[in-house]
């Protein structure tokens, strides 16, 4: 099962095959993508997105991914780091396709999707900027500042309970 293999890599930092051969993933970057729930993200239908995710991800996998995303924000140089909230988010950058489908333009889509508070998600935010201009056109430099402003205002308006001193636990498979 793919998710059990992923959990072994996330939990142990290594993978062992049936013959006892071990591969270390200590210095590995794992890139995970999915279109699960994408039909509902643009409609801002959180319940449908979560319903689809629950059908695909085991709770321990979701918690492990949340921990990775949260640690990346809290321990890195992310522009979306907040004082009161743990945020789980991922940025993205892609070339914009030509309208006739024959390749790509020199323009980019920059995006970020994330949720907060990470320990008890109440808000899912998706920001996509079409054809941003400038020298450093990345999800982290274009879409992330918009995400931070929106998430700050939403947290204030909804009076979200801070979780910055709450660890996002990772359950290990026993």
Image (cartoon, grey):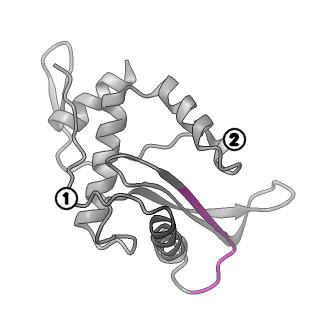
The answer to whether residue 130 is magenta is yes
Disc number placed over residue 165 in the picture, else none: 1
Quadrant location of residue 100? bottom right
Relative height, residue 169 to residue 16 (above, below): below
Q: Which residues are magenta?
A: 125-134
Disc number placed over residue 133 in the picture, else none: none
Q: Are marks 1 and 2 in contact (CB under 8 Å)?
A: no
Q: Nearer the viewer, residue 1 or 149?
A: 149
- Dominant SS type (magenta): strand
Identify which residue is drawn at 46% across, 50% down: 122
The answer to whether residue 3 is magenta is no
The x and y percentages for residue 148 are 46, 72
Q: Nearer the viewer, residue 62 or 82?
A: 82
Relative height, residue 127 to residue 50 (above, below): below
Image quadrant occupied by the N terminus = top left
Q: Please identify the residue farthest to the bottom as the structure is shown.
A: 134
Identify which residue is drawn at 14% across, 23% down: 21
Q: Nearer the viewer, residue 46 or 53?
A: 46
Structural distance between the alpha carbons of marks 1 and 2: 34 Å
Left or right, 167 with reference to 108: left
Left or right, 121 with reference to 16: right
Image quadrant occupied by the C terminus = top left
Identify which residue is drawn at 43% across, 63% down: 159
Relative height, residue 52 to residue 74 (above, below): above
The x and y percentages for residue 57 are 43, 28
Is label 2 in a helix, a strand or a loop?
Answer: helix
Q: Earlier in the sequence, mark 1 or mark 2?
A: 2
Q: Residues within 10 Å of mark 2 (few under 14, many from 20)?
A: few
The x and y percentages for residue 116 are 41, 55
Identify which residue is drawn at 31% across, 60% down: 162
Disc number placed over residue 39 in the picture, else none: 2
Is label 1 in a helix, a strand or a loop?
Answer: loop
């Amino acid at each position: 099962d793919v998710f059990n293999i992923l959990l072994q890599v996330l939990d142990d930092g290594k993978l062992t095959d049936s013959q006892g051969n071990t591969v270390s993933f200590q210095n590995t970057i794992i890139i995970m993508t999915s279109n699960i729930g994408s039909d509902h993200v643009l409609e801002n239908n959180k319940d449908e997105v979560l319903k689809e995710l629950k059908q695909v991800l085991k709770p321990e996998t979701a918690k492990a991914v949340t921990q990775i995303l949260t640690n990346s924000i809290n321990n890195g140089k992310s522009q979306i780091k907040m004082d009161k909230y743990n945020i789980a988010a991922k940025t993205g950058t892609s070339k914009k396709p030509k309208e006739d489908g024959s390749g790509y333009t020199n323009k980019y889509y920059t995006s970020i999707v994330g949720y907060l508070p990470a320990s008890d998600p109440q808000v899912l935010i998706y920001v996509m900027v079409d054809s941003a201009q400038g020298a450093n056109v990345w999800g982290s430099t274009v879409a992330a500042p918009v995400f931070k402003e929106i998430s700050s205002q939403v947290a204030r308006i909804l009076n979200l309970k801070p979780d910055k001193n709450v660890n996002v636990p990772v359950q290990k498979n026993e």
